[in-house]
Amino acid sequence: MKTDSSAPLWSDPSLDAGSRADALIAEMTLQEKIAQLYGVWVGASDEGGEVAPHQHDMEEAVDLDELLPYGLGQLTRPFGTAPVDPAAGALSLARTQRRIARANRFGIPALAHEECLAGFATWGATAYPVPLSWGATFNPGLIREMAVAIGRDMRSVGIHQGLAPVLDVVRDARWGRVEETIGEDPYLVGTVATAYVQGLESAGIVATLKHFAGYSASRAGRNLAPVGMGARERADVILPPFEMAVREGGVRSVMHAYTDTDGIPSAADERLLTGLLRDTWGFTGTVVADYFGIAFLKTLHGVAGTFGEAAGAALAAGVDVELPTVKTFGEPLLEAVAEGRVPETLVDRAVRRVLVQKAELGLLDRDWSAVPPALAGADPMNGADPDAGTERGSVRLDSDDNRALARRVAEQAVVLLRNDGTLPLSPAHAPERSAPPARIALIGPNAEAPTAVLGCYAFPVHVGVQYPEVPVGIELPTLHEALAAEFPDSEIVVAPGANVDGTDTTGFAVAAELARGADIVIAALGDRAGLFGRGTSGEGCDAESLALPGVQQQLLDTLLDTGAPVVVTLVAGRPYALGRAATESAAVVQSFFPGEEGTRAIASVIGGRTAPAGRLPVSVPRHPGAQPSTYLAARLGHSSEVSNIDPTPAFGFGHGLTYTTFAWTDLTVERDEAATDGAFGMAFTVRNTGMREGTELVQLYLHDPVASVVQPVQRLIGYVRLELTPGQSVRVHATVPADLAAFSGRDGLRIVEPGELELRFGASSTEPRLTSRVTLTGPVREVDHLRLLHAEFSTEPTA
């Protein structure tokens, strides 16, 4: 197994990755192969020493000295487990990688992974807006740019894999992890997530699709609850974003979901993880376990009697790597294989996928170096001094360029839900206003909370709360500070009024007094992100209803009762019912955990320097108990005479106002009839008829009035952003392939049926502007995973 130069075949980068992996597997013992299939949860040393195993209440102690001679598949969150200076962390990881490679006889380092749900989840790194804000931008190109920046920072310090994006489609907004999703529409989720994947992968980071599949559809929105979902809902709503990301994103890893659907846990679902993902879609990367998910087959799902049985079931289904640490793929799997209860061929299949990926990442190359790019030029690997070759503070993960990018994403994600003309407040951006408000009353629990803008996977919230003595590591201006900078000539008086989730109303009187004495009231309401009940939004922070947490609705009503104009600002992880404010407030400004530059983005929109451009990725309910409901409902899921519950939203999916006006005119249909394998063509004009620049989002919805199975009343099949100056107009051309009308028929096959359709061009799901009635002709046509996924849009200026 040697080349002429005596270098092992597996270390020769001139060979293809598969051949290298095969050569290595042929030399490995069973224990060495299994060692590549699990990770160890570690924490980097803030002094630059080697990582130390992280002890967690769901895992057992790990002895690295005992494990490392056999090798190690992954290192779990070396930067994201405790606060660590980035330079010291990079040095710590480099030294540990050298130790791992030297300890095993093949010189194989570990693959290091981190969370990157809203930026690299480590101390001092840029905290970008959460995925629900990505969806609000309706701007895949911007999200791709953000992902490149995130991936570049991760790669610079030695990270190989990022556990993002989340492709779960919101089915019940009470679910705590709604903030991690991109929205309630599969096409929006798919296009934005695919762009994120493309960006992360282009930076050299292995992107990880999660959670495959159905996690967001858990009953009653409860974390890890069983999923009650039919095959067609799964095929037409849950799976399309994953399918798109696999086809178009170049993704190299997928994470299974915790949940079980119709009694089958995803971690043990061979039809899902192998039959669909690999055999049908052609995915060739690794499938990794959600943390402790394989052990859950025994402890939570009860489909395995032992950890060895759980390991065998997961391997057979198609799971390749156990995360975050060794539990089932260690001794339990070794014993199960040795006793013949699990075929060694399953181990070989999984380890080949792992080693192919390591070869592609350069981790098997003969000239592989443990020194990451951020430490290049230094000599950090020599000497006993733990700080040798590096300087604390020399690696910056929150650059000026990063912050500027975070600001752009946050600004484009702000959604103006309501405006009676009060906004913008600055006379520089509102000619009819002679002066800024002399006195602003800023009332609410999020007025002076620096971390209010962060989601539950942002490092200061996810980990930093456990280290109160450590500085946050990034600049987090409060809404008060941002508004003071935006309105330097205004007096701003502040009162919390109440806590985010408290029951104390004694602060209402002071809040009302300040409101009555102000020219404008800005209510700072919303969520506090946290984990497992420590917040009002986040993993394990599910909601009983979509009423504002605590007594915030009562506080808001108190402010409205004063008669002062109230601008409601919401910084939240999910949509909430707003009661009277939906119709009585002066304005409603919605932001979904907008990251470190979020308050400045909100203040800029309120003042008018930034024109609001965001659109709702999830519907805002009119009533807190009308759940679960999304705009993707069939006829009987909408308001009807057969139920006393009205699920009509206060603000529908896709809604968002601007500071200008647009006219949509002159719809022409170039082709209103097409075969079931053809396409329709149409065009129309959009003109900015207002006095300032603005963004119009053209949304294309398909309505199928008669189908062989019940369909949603409408569903998004395309969109295009138009940024127009006053008086500017463009002609929008759209080509809509018949494939976009496909759905899962009665026999489970995806089909395109002949018949009439409506193509609705709208400003939101509740505001159609132009409608074209078209007809599909010919026989029912079966389509597969290679069908066309997108409408084609083009624009040209008009005279």
Image (cartoon, rainbow, N blue to C red):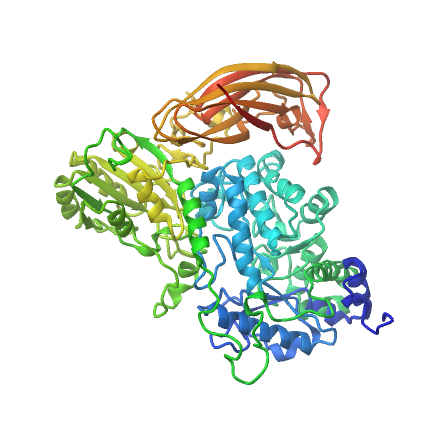
Which residue: 78% across, 72% down? 29
Closest to the observer, 658 or 592: 658
From the viewer's perspective, is residue 688 above or below residue 552? above
**Residue 650, quarter of picture:** top left
From the viewer's perspective, is residue 535 above or below residue 105? above
Classify residue 19 as left or right of residue 608.
right
- The quadrant of the rendering that contains the N terminus is bottom right
**Which residue is the extreme one toward the right?**
4
Q: Is residue 114 visible?
A: no
Which residue: 58% across, 65% down? 373
Q: Is residue 312 visible?
A: yes
From the viewer's perspective, is residue 168 above or below residue 331? above
Closest to the observer, 111 or 526: 111
Where in the figure is residue 482, as x and y percent of width and height? 29, 49
Where in the figure is residue 126, as x and y percent of width and height? 44, 57
Classify residue 159 as left or right of residue 270.
left
Where in the figure is residue 484, as x and y percent of width and height? 24, 49
Which residue: 30% across, 54% down? 449
Which residue: 35% across, 35% down? 416
**Which residue is the extreme one toward the bottom?**
384
Classify residue 541 as left or right of residue 162.
left
Where in the figure is residue 670, as x and y percent of width and height? 61, 15
**Residue 727, quarter of picture:** top left
Closest to the observer, 300 or 517: 517
